[in-house]
Image: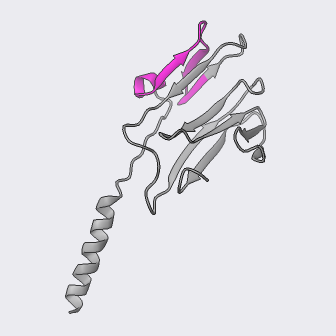
Amino acid sequence: MQQALVCLILLAFGTVLAQAEQYWIAYEGNDFPENEGWVRYSSDPPAERWLEDGNFFIDSRADVPIVENYTLYFDSGLDPGPGETFIMRWKLNVHEATPWEDPGVYVILDDLYSVAFLFAESYLLSFYEPDVYVEFEPGMFHEFEMRSDDMRS
């Protein structure tokens, strides 16, 4: 009886593991994003950009209308299933920014729910949640993380 119970538990656990396929998408700054599956949108004239020591730099300060945007499209939705968590991490150092113009990190879901973080040299704010305002030390890289179990909160 005990062996049957252990086999049943292992079989049930194995089934749960098989259902939850983990995915991981990373951009490491080794190449330009468009060479790693991202779609680039750039204004005319484009922003200056370069790779240096594993970092991707974008400089759009030459003119206010300059836009540099990278989008990653997914074949299936990003909504996590039951018991799953969506986690997005990034590292950013904003040297100089024009408020409401540069830079931002956005996630837009299939059903058009979205989150948008806007950055300045020393703070971030959530575009859709005015009470989310976080200050940080300027002039250095900071790591950010967004987590959601339901992509609504």
Along the line of sight, which residue is nearer the eye, 107 or 28? 107
Q: Quadrant of residue 21?
A: bottom left
Q: Position of residue 59 (x, y in %)?
A: 66, 18
Q: Which residues are magenta?
A: 32-57
What residue lies at 28% left-to-right and 73% top-to-bottom? Answer: 12
Locate residue 16, reporting x and y percent.
Answer: 32, 66
* Image position, residue 152 (x, y; %): 58, 51
Residue displayed at 61% across by 53% down? 153
State yes or no: residue 49 in magenta: yes
Residue 19 point in image, percent of width and height: 31, 59
> Is the residue 81 above or below the residue 106 in the image?
below
- The residue lying at 70 percent from left, 25 percent from top is 102
Foreground residue among 96 and 102: 102
138 relative position to 108: left or right: right
State the count of labels: 0
Identify the residue shown where x is 56% and y is 38%. Answer: 107
Of the 4 image quadrants, the one containing the N terminus is bottom left
Q: How is the image coloured?
A: one colour
**5 part of magenta stretch:** no
